[in-house]
Amino acid sequence: MRRFFYAINNDNTDAMPLPKLGDLPLGSHVELPDSIVHHWCRVLRANIGDEGVLFDGFGGEYHVQLQSISKKHATVAVLAHSTDERTAPILSQIGLVMSRGDRMDYAIQKSTELGVTAIQLLTSHHGEVNLKPAQVEKKLAHWQQVAIAACEQCGLNRPPLILTPMSITDWLTQPSRSAPHLTVSPLVAELSQDHYYQALQQPADLRLQLSVPAVGQPAMPEALLPLLKQAAPYIELLIGPEGGFSDEECKWAADAGFAPWQIGARVLRTETAPVVALATLHALTL
């Protein structure tokens, strides 16, 4: 059955925000956002009576049936609610230095499939990408949509937040995580205020920097395995660019409490490192 993200921050720029699905009684008729109308009704050629699944990121998912289709609009009836979440047992945020083109899309897509909670986009001394102010909104929307599409495919009901780019210096030296708002694409602006994501405002239980293998450096921080035995630990991962972090950035990371973590004896590409790190964390919780 087809799954679609129902964004209450409607992609119709001249329209009012849509209601949360959880605020509506079963049997209610709901107008679909343009993106779902286009994909489901035009691209996939759905018909009245076809059924699908909607999730709005606020918890669970909703079984719906198409009731009407016109040139620009479509409505569904909400038939049932499932409380299935499928979120990872670890709350995780990746500080990821931006890379070019498909490599960045791949890192976000696969991190989403592996249950990452948020990705903080970073610039660094050796990074390939430094967005101009006029580019930020468009790129942020694109990468958030990559994450949402991955959720639709893999069954995750709470999409990861893609956080607006900032320099690694600012991220590592900011005094706390107590900022009143997470800076995200308008598509998920209200969703980012949900209690599930507010834990990202708190200090992480452990901060790990994916590092290049080095002689004499422990492969795994001692604190990691005991932490993974706790309920819902919050872990931050720092992943650098292809050229690696500068010595100064490594010092900043250490000063900010990031412990080096080397996974194996190989040097991983920047788009591979998030996948390996998240998969390893999940395997260690089993």
Image (cartoon, helix red, strand yellow):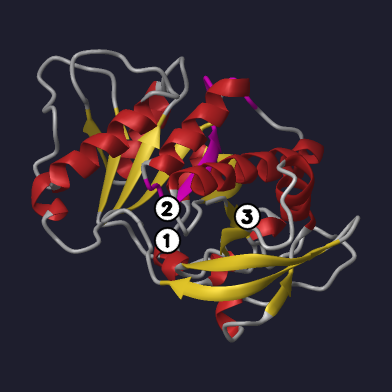
Q: Are marks 3 and 2 in contact (CB under 8 Å)?
A: no
Q: Of the two numbered discs 3 and 2 on the same chain, state the one appearing first in sequence.
A: 2
> In x, y percent, where is residue 5?
60, 56
Could you tell me which secondary element the residue under label 2 belongs to? loop
How many C-alpha atoms fall within 10 Å of the one at disc 2: few (<14), some, or many (≥20)? Answer: many
Q: Are marks 1 and 3 in contact (CB under 8 Å)?
A: no
> In x, y percent, where is residue 76?
69, 69
How many C-alpha atoms fall within 10 Å of the one at disc 1: few (<14), some, or many (≥20)? Answer: many
Res. 78 image quadrant: bottom right
**Residue drawn at 21 percent across, 25 percent down:** 263
Inspect the image, locate mark 3, and give the three-letter code of the amino acid beneath it: Val
Is 168 placed above or below 56 here?
above
The residue that disc 2 covers is 117
Magenta range is 115-129
Q: Of the two numbered discs 1 and 3 on the same chain, state the one appearing first in sequence.
A: 3
> In x, y percent, where is residue 230?
14, 61
Could you tell me which secondary element the residue under label 3 belongs to? loop
